[in-house]
Image (tube, rainbow, N blue to C red):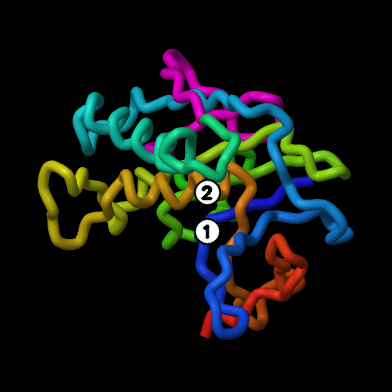
Amino acid sequence: MRAPGVIALALLVTGPAPALAFVPYRTADNLHAFYWPDSCVGLTAYVGSFSEIPYDQTMGAVRAAARTWSTPAVACTYMNVEIMTGSGTPPHAGNDGRNVMLFRTDRWCRWNDPPESCSYDSSALAITSVFAKGDGHIIDADIEVNASMGDIRWMNADVMIVPGKYDLQNALTHEMGHFLGFDHTCYKPGANKERQLDDMGKPVPDCG
């Protein structure tokens, strides 16, 4: 099962008092929420071909995004995302048991798309694909960063804010939520999927 993602935790108000809720990806039958069976999950980042931001700043953004979702930064989680650095030719994004972050500088398309077509949304900053078994336990998750489209440029806002560019750490923090199994917190009518349920089984509100 594959759940592609491209908002994670939210405060949902249900009555007079706010309640902290989250929206997990779910299996096709809606019976099981996605989850990682281990508390420590590795993610290998391949950033060799990405040169818009200096390497150390890029890896700093990757690690900071992972820390945002990990213990001890988040007291209510059992998860810890461990960032490793990859070298050489990166693997393809897919259900192969390897969790990877890829900076796509050549072509913003699925790796096996034919030359004349492309299945990725050209406006997407990044895409996270999560693969899980029928009971919801995640077996693979990959993050792909759009670094090949001319109208999508990146910056490190901690160093310098550049108009028209996107903050890499902010975007990666969003994708890390998907990597951990969180779905969007609202439903877009007309979307080609059923309305999501939060962790308490309540339907999420419309995005509008």
Please state the extent of the stretch shown in magenta in the rendering: 81-106
The local secondary structure at tag 2 comes to: helix
The answer to which of 167 and 76 lies nearer the viewer is 76
Residue located 69% across and 36% down the image: 36
Q: Main secondary structure of the magenta part?
A: loop
Contact? badges 1 and 2 (CB < 8 Å) = yes
| Residue 177: mark in rendering | 2
In the image, residue 87 sits, relative to residue 188, either above or below, namely: above
Query: Left or right: 72 with respect to 4?
Result: left
Can residue 185 be seen in this snapshot? yes
Of 3 and 87, nearer the camera is 3
Please give left or right for residue 109 compared with residue 68 in the image: right
Cα distance in 3D space between marks 1 and 2:
8 Å
Name the element at disc 1.
strand
Residue 2: x percent and y percent? 73, 47
Of all residues, the one furthest to the front in this rendering is: 17
Q: Is residue 96 above or below residue 134?
A: above
In terms of image quadrants, where is residue 139? top right
Q: Amino acid at mark 2?
A: Gly
Residue type, mark 1 in image:
Leu
Residue receiving disc 1: 9
The crowding category of the residue bearing disc 1, from other C-alpha atoms within 10 Å (few below 14, some 14 to 19, many at least 20), is some
Q: Earlier in the sequence, mark 1 or mark 2?
A: 1
Which circle marks residue 189 in the picture?
none
Q: Is residue 83 magenta?
A: yes
Q: Does the magenta segment cover residue 98?
A: yes
The residue under the point 77% across, 38% down is 137
Horizontal side, residue 134 vs residue 112: left or right? right
